[in-house]
């Protein structure tokens, strides 16, 4: 598949979407979001792919929305753009397969929000991460109001959004904004290693777990969540894969 604004690669059971507008630090325009969604659809429809990594080409993950486009939009056109952006973010948040953001360089604004929408974040030590919206009289999108608070707590979320200051990868790791921090030259190896570790497990189980975690984050009441947990567990244990997994587990224990 050929795209204008991304590089799309499959490494057997792991796919990588690399944002590819390096001359503008991977600033996000409409075509980039269309390309991302098309590649995600291909990942979703390919049973061989078990995990998806997002990263950026060059010196940035993404510096956010392309402001050259925003200057010429009418209010109505801006609403259409924002609603399309929100729908793309929903697709990432609700994507059935595990997603990993490998954050290189700058991850700002909408780029930062794409990383927040992923299940796991791995950052380079020297990455620069932040929401500059308050500096340019804008506001955050992509579910960031909830996603950021879930990761770092309401107080820290307010500090980061109100000050509009950037933090590096090391600080992001310290406050729990990212899962893992590594030297920049080890970033993709770390992301691929994590993706392959996930890919070894049951894709069906992970799909159920992802849905349950999303419900637990506020999409459902505790009662509805616990009802879902019963149904999800029953769905998993009723598969042939479950029996194969148990046999593998028992054989491993016998060898210990």
Image: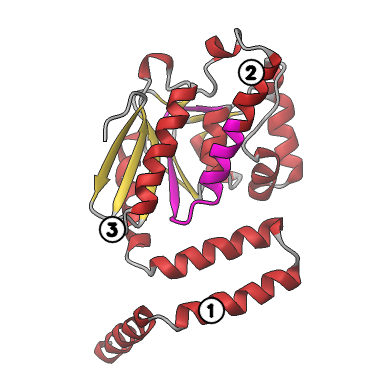
Could you tell me residue 158's position as x and y percent?
Answer: 75, 35
For the residue pair 61 and 239, the one nearer the viewer reads as 239
Q: Residue at x 38, y 81 (%)?
A: 242
Mark nearer the viewer, 3 or 2 = 2
Q: Can you say which quadrant of the picture contains the N terminus? A: top left
Could you tell me residue 169's position as x and y percent?
Answer: 49, 36
**Crowding at mark 1 (Cα within 10 Å: few <14, some 14-19, many 20+):** few
- Segment colored magenta: 84-108
For the residue pair 130 and 20, the one nearer the viewer reads as 20
Query: What is the distance, in whole Å, between disc 1 and disc 3 at their CAs?
Result: 23 Å
Q: Secondary structure at mark 2?
A: helix
Asked if residue 104 is among those painted magenta in the image, a careful observer would answer yes
Asked if residue 154 is among those painted magenta in the image, a careful observer would answer no
| Drawn side of residue 97 relative to residue 69, left or right | left
In the picture of the structure, the residue carrying the numbered disc 1 is 233
In the picture of the structure, the residue carrying the numbered disc 2 is 77
| Drawn side of residue 73 relative to residue 182, left or right | right
Q: Residue at x 38, y 48 (%)?
A: 52
């Amino acid at each position: 598949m050929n795209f204008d604004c991304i590089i799309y690669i499959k490494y057997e059971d792991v796919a990588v979407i690399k944002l590819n507008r390096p001359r503008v630090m991977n600033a996000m325009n409409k075509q980039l979001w269309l390309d991302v969604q098309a590649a995600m659809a291909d990942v979703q429809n390919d049973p061989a792919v078990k995990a998806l990594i997002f990263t950026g080409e060059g010196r940035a993950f993404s510096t956010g929305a392309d402001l050259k486009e925003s200057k010429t939009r009418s209010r109505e056109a801006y609403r259409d753009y924002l609603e399309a952006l929100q729908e793309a973010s929903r697709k990432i948040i609700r994507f059935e397969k595990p997603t990993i953001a490998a954050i290189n360089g700058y991850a700002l604004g909408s780029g930062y929000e794409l990383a927040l929408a992923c299940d796991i974040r791995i950052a380079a030590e020297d990455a620069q991460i932040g929401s500059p919206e308050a500096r340019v009289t804008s506001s955050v999108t992509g579910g960031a109001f909830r996603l950021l608070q879930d990761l770092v707590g309401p107080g820290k979320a307010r500090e980061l959004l109100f000050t509009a200051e950037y933090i590096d990868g090391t600080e992001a790791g310290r406050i729990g904004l990212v899962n893992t921090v590594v030297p920049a030259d080890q970033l993709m190896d770390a992301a691929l290693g994590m993706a392959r570790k996930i890919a070894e497990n049951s894709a069906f189980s992970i799909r159920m777990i992802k849905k349950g975690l999303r419900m637990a984050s506020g999409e459902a009441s505790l009662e509805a969540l616990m009802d879902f947990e019963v149904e999800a567990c029953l769905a998993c244990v009723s598969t042939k894969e479950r029996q194969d997994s148990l046999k593998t587990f028992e054989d491993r224990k016998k060898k210990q």
